[in-house]
Image (cartoon, grey):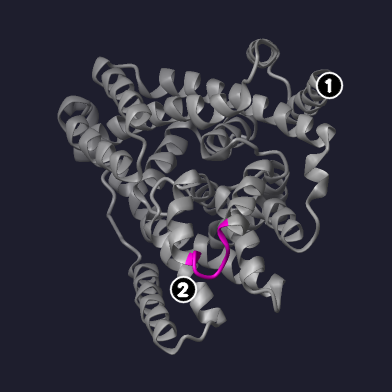
């Protein structure tokens, strides 16, 4: 358990770039370096996370921890990956954030954003070769990328995944001889976790309704607000922002919300950790309690649903009738990652020809010499600081 926690904690310290970058970091660490699981299994977990509401990359991390060490392993992975961003955002909520104005700090953050471009580009390249070998898969990848670039929305992303699965069942299914050789597994859904998810969702709806009628704010209302948001967000990342603002807009000022959003982008780890900042700002009487309640509430729904489907997903994904659908979803996810590479990752990181030159150099070094991720983090951090000093 400590090994799982330590691995994810070390990634949580340096995982800038949002969900797309996190997927690249996870693949680099747990598939290529540690061999905790293979590409096929990893792709299956990524595809599953796309169908579930909640923080996509954190769900993948939770599933990797679960694969390695059961439920405790999943919890250890979540705690390790989320703890750095939780601590940073909580401290920023209760202390001064003037240090963010220093050019040196901004330079380091900028350099790590450039590293995210390199990591995501590498993940896309490898996943394209893995999941887009056939012509229908390549077409799905291109179409999903183009559509998401033109119409980026949670509904469009979910619709594309459904459409891709339907197309893939017909055009990407394995041949009959290969399918007949695959072992058949029983599908067993875990109804305990499903009942707990549904029960908490119903309870949260009732709690918010009662608190609205009484006009009294309490921790139950705080938990309910963030739990509902975590239950409705597909894709994670920046998609959570409009729902969060709608849910807690009456409890926090617009300026405070935007400040939290800016800080969440400046720290490593999942965007959902923004809940730590908002919870501390809303529950000012006991900010640590507010941060803990909000963070637990927003992550919990996605993890409960993953527990419902994790074991059954491997059985379902091995069945002949869904192999094509999974292949299509994986191709679609590659398209989503390609779209995310442009915005927000590339568009917010590469601001000059010097930045682009550093990205190209870093990508070349990454592919040729395959250095450890921490060497890359240190190198890009120093390069970013030097660029910041040069520009200023």
Q: Is residue 251 magenta?
A: yes
On the image, the x and y values in percent for residue 61 come to 55, 47
Q: Is residue 30 above or below residue 174?
A: below
Q: Nearer the viewer, residue 177 or 93?
A: 93
On the image, the x and y values in percent for residue 68 come to 57, 49
Residue at figure coordinates x 74%, y 25% from the top left: 376
Q: Indicate left or right for 126 with 253 as reference.
A: left
- Callout 2 secondary element: helix
Q: Residues within 10 Å of mark 1 (few under 14, many from 20)?
A: some
- Callout 1 secondary element: helix
Residue at figure coordinates x 51%, y 73% from the top left: 223
The residues colored magenta run: 248-254
Residue at numbered disc 2: 224
On the image, the x and y values in percent for residue 21 come to 57, 33
Mark pair 2, 1: CA separation: 45 Å
Q: Can residue 312 be seen from the camera position used here? A: yes
| Residue 386 tag number | 1
Quadrant of image for the N terminus: bottom right
Quadrant of image for the C terminus: top right
| Residue 344 tag number | none
């Amino acid at each position: 358990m400590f090994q799982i926690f330590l691995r994810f904690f070390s990634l949580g310290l340096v995982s800038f770039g949002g969900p797309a970058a996190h997927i690249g970091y996870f693949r680099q660490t747990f598939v290529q370096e540690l061999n905790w699981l293979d590409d096929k299994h990893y792709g299956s977990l990524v595809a599953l996370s796309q169908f579930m509401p909640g923080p996509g990359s954190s769900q993948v991390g939770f599933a990797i921890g679960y694969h390695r060490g059961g439920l405790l392993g999943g919890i250890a992975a979540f705690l390790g990956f989320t703890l750095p961003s939780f601590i940073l955002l909580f401290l920023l909520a209760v202390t001064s954030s003037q240090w963010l104005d220093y050019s040196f700090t901004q330079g380091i953050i900028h350099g790590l954003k450039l590293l995210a471009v390199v990591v995501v580009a590498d993940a896309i390249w490898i996943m394209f070769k893995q999941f887009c070998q056939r012509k229908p898969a390549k077409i799905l990848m291109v179409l999903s990328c183009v559509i998401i670039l033109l119409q980026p929305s949670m509904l469009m992303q979910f619709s594309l995944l459904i459409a891709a699965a339907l197309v893939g069942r017909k055009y990407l299914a394995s041949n009959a001889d290969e399918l007949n050789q695959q072992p058949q597994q029983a599908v067993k859904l875990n109804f305990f976790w499903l009942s707990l998810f549904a029960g908490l969702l119903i309870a949260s709806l009732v709690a918010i309704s009662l608190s609205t009628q009484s006009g009294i704010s309490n921790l139950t209302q705080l938990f309910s607000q963030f739990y509902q948001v975590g239950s409705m967000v597909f894709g994670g990342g920046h998609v959570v922002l409009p729902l969060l603002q709608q849910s807690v807009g009456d409890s926090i000022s617009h300026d405070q919300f935007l400040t939290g959003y800016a800080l969440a982008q400046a720290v490593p780890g999942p965007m959902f950790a923004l809940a730590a900042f908002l919870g501390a700002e809303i529950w000012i009487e006991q900010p640590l309690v507010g941060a803990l309640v909000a963070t637990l509430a927003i992550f919990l729904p996605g993890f409960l649903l993953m527990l419902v489907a994790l074991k059954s997903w491997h059985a379902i994904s091995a069945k002949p009738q869904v192999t094509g659908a999974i292949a299509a979803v994986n191709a679609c996810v590659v398209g989503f990652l390609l779209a995310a590479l442009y915005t927000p990752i590339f568009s917010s990181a590469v601001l000059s020809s010097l930045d682009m030159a550093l990205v190209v150099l870093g990508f070349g070094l990454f592919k040729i010499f395959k250095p450890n991720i921490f060497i890359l983090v240190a190198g890009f951090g120093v390069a970013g600081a030097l660029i910041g000093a040069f520009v200023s």
